[in-house]
Image: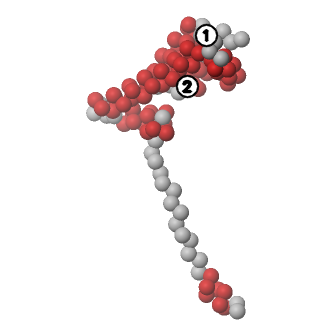
Amino acid sequence: MFRLTSDIVNAVDAAIRSGVTRVRALKTSGIGARELKEIQQLAQGGVEPFWSFIKGLHEAEAAAEATFVATIGKSRDWRAAAFLLERRFPEEWGQKSECREEPVQHHLDGDVRRHE
């Protein structure tokens, strides 16, 4: 079982709150995909401290988002925070592009008549 120390928890929390992505924060603290899967499985079963750790990840991400939004609101140069919001939270802050299907006009009528 993965040993989740307070040093790891604090490092991941601080990194995420400062704007580092979850994956990078975990990786720099020695938590890879295999360890994260184990932690998530234990957390789903309500096992502490894993449940609180996963809950803390979500709270840290929400705090980072709130910080970025506040920076945009009070800064003259808000572009860096906007950039981070767009990239870190694309569902909420990413640019929305509409994909429209344009009818394709084929000019086959003339070609078909020529071959009749």
Compare marks 1 and 2 and give the one earlier in the sequence.
Answer: 2
- Residue found at the far top of this picture: 6
| Residue behind mark 2 | 22
The x, y position of residue 5, in whole percent, is 60, 7
User: Crowding at label 2, few (<14), some or many (≥20) Cα neighbours within 10 Å?
Assistant: some
| Residue behind mark 1 | 48
- The quadrant of the picture occupied by the C terminus is bottom right
Judging depth in this view, the residue of 103 and 12 nearest the camera is 103
**Residue occupying the point 45% across, 45% down:** 95
Residue 60 lies, with reference to residue 93, above or below; the image says above
Q: How many marks?
A: 2
Q: Is residue 47 left or right of residue 101?
A: right
**Residue occupying the point 28% across, 29% down:** 74
The x, y position of residue 63, in whole percent, is 43, 23
Judging depth in this view, the residue of 95 and 50 nearest the camera is 50
The x, y position of residue 25, in whole percent, is 55, 21
Compute the Cα span from label 1 to label 2.
20 Å
Query: Which amino acid type corresponds to the residue marked 1 in the rendered image?
Result: Glu
